[in-house]
Image (tube, rainbow, N blue to C red):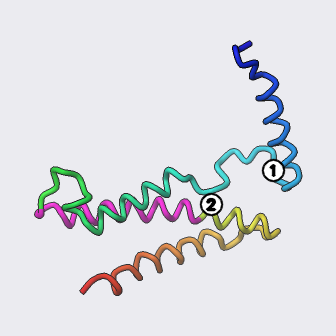
Amino acid sequence: MSAFELDGVVAGLRDARERWRSAQHRPQELGMRELPDRAQVAQVVDALSAALFPLRLGPPQLKREGEDFFVGHTLDFALQTLLAQARLELRYAARLAGRDGDGVDAQADSIVRQFAQGACPNFCV
């Protein structure tokens, strides 16, 4: 037993989580993450920032001759990560709406492609 007698607190929190999950009709075990991961979304934002401003927000050793390679590699990482997170969000939304989730992968792919293609016309000159 800890000095704070946490066993009862931990058990109470577990009971509260189980009641909430039951009320929300959430599956007991998914075997995977159900919602987007906050840390991965933050990595996407950081990577996109570095791709937009590579010599300022990219790695300190980056030189102009390696800039395009860095931008391409970084965008690929950011968009692949964003795609995975978009799929999670769309599957979750489909489940909440009582839909089976068919077409979620194609929808996520379309959203991320539009995002990627839409950035440059407004930004590039």
Tell me the quadrant of the picture where the C terminus can be found: bottom left
Q: Residue at 71% of width from left, 19% of height from top? A: 4
Q: Nearer the viewer, residue 41 or 77?
A: 41
User: Label 1 is placed on what type of residue?
Assistant: Pro
The circle on residue 27 is 1
As drawn, 43 above or below 31: below
The circle on residue 96 is none
Q: Residue at 25% of width from left, 57% of height from top? A: 58
Tell me the quadrant of the picture where the N terminus can be found: top right
User: Label 2 is placed on what type of residue?
Assistant: Leu
Q: Residue at 88% of width from left, 53% of height from top? A: 23
Magenta range is 64-86
Single out the residue that lies furthest toward the front: 4
Magenta residues: mostly which secondary structure? helix
Q: Is residue 51 magenta?
A: no
Residue that badge 2 annotates: 88
- Residue 59 horizontal/vertical position (percent): 23, 52
- Residue 114 horizontal/vertical position (percent): 47, 80
As drawn, 93 above or below 21: below
Q: Residues within 10 Å of mark 1 (few under 14, many from 20)?
A: few
Residue 124 position by quadrant? bottom left
Q: Secondary structure at mark 2?
A: helix
Q: Earlier in the sequence, mark 2 or mark 1?
A: 1
Q: Is residue 46 left or right of residue 31?
A: left
Q: Is residue 76 magenta?
A: yes
Q: Residue at 62% of width from left, 60% of height from top? A: 88
Residue 19 position by quadrant? top right
Q: Residues within 10 Å of mark 2 (few under 14, many from 20)?
A: many
Q: Secondary structure at mark 1?
A: loop
- Residue 13 horizontal/vertical position (percent): 79, 36
